[in-house]
Image (cartoon, rainbow, N blue to C red):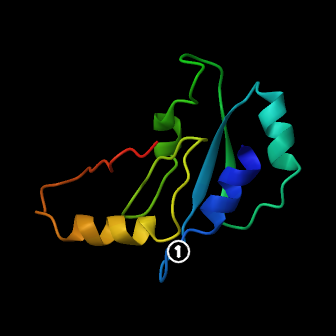
Amino acid sequence: MLADLVARLARLDTRPTPCKVLLLVEADDEDTRRALGALSLGPQFEMVLIPPGKPRTKPRPQRGLARASGEFWVIFDAEDRPEPAQLRKAVAGVRSLAPWVVCVQAELQY
């Protein structure tokens, strides 16, 4: 699943601005750390180790948001399959909204 996610994230079209991808991993999740180490990650990827804590099902995205920069942020789960133009469409959509809108959530497709 991890290799598929990284491949999909690498295909995201974020022109003209490059995208930084923070891969949040529980510090004690040796299997995921080893799997990431075996992948050829592009320069846009950075593994962020999250200290042990709860809940265990997700590595607490607020830790990643503390390291995020830029005008727009997005959170994907490991099982997500974003289409290449998804972020460009989302940014265009947000820019068309009232200035007081600070967060949007896309429809969940499963």
**Residue 32 at x, y = what percent?**
78, 36
Disc 1 residue type (three-letter): Asp
**Residue 100 at x, y = what percent?**
12, 56
Toward which corner of the image does residue 91 lie, by quadrant? Answer: bottom left
**Crowdedness of circle 1 by 10 Å Cα count: few (<14), some, many (20+)?**
some
Q: Which residue is at 58% across, 23% downward?
A: 57
Residue 37 vs 98, above or below: the answer is above
**Residue 30 at x, y = what percent?**
83, 29
**85 or 25: which is nearer to us?**
85
Residue 106 is left or right of residue 109, and the answer is: left
**Residue 44 at x, y = what percent?**
65, 65
Q: Quadrant of the N terminus?
A: top right
In this rendering, does residue 65 appear at all? Answer: yes
Identity of the residue furthest to the bottom in this view: 16
Q: Which residue is at 66% across, 51% downward?
A: 5
Q: Secondary structure at mark 1?
A: loop
